[in-house]
Amino acid sequence: MIHNRHCAPWHPALGWIEHYQTKFNKFLERPVSFPLKQTTLPARRYLDAFAYGAKVVHATSKKGDPAADLNGLLAAHARQMVAMGYHFILRTLLGYVSMSMPVLRQNVTHWIKDLGWTGTASPGGRELFGG
């Protein structure tokens, strides 16, 4: 991430960002616990089941069989509950990202406005995560 390459190693923002990055990544590897209490499917595979298994994204997953995962979810649970699980995953991941964005934006805005770095006055996701 561009922020971590340019932020001073002693700056507390690094620890803040790493904390939420770790939570984000660990969440992807844990089984989805809401609303489907019985599933052992990790969040990453659950997301793949929707994207690849439902053929929303035209690619193949590198791990497992997304179509089989989606069919298994739909066979074991009501369609609405499976959709709620997907929504829960997205909301949780967005929560981790939203905890990082203000810190990233504050630092990058300071670098642009106060230090004369090239960039937009109010950096968005592309400026914050790109590069």
Image (cartoon, rainbow, N blue to C red):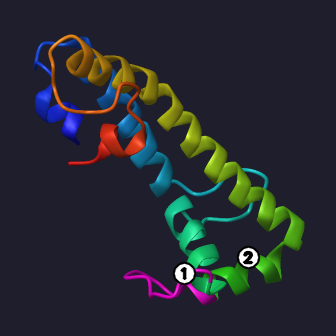
Q: Position of residue 78 (x, y in %)?
A: 89, 72
Q: Amino acid at mark 2?
A: Leu
Q: Please rate how many residues cluster around mark 2, counting C-alpha atoms within 10 Å: few if below 14, some from 14 to 19, many from 20.
A: many
Q: Residue at x 18, y 13 (%)?
A: 11
Residue 17 occupies which quadrant of the picture?
top left
Q: Amino acid at mark 1?
A: Val
Q: Is residue 121 left or right of residue 15?
A: right
Label 2 sits on a secondary structure element that is helix
Screen quadrant of the N terminus: top left
Q: CA distance from mark 2 to mark 1?
A: 18 Å
Which residue position holds label 2?
73
Q: Residue at x 16, y 26 (%)?
A: 117
Magenta region: which residues? 56-67
> On screen, 130 above or below 97?
below
Q: Is residue 59 magenta?
A: yes
Q: Residue at x 54, y 73 (%)?
A: 48
Q: Residue at x 32, y 37 (%)?
A: 128
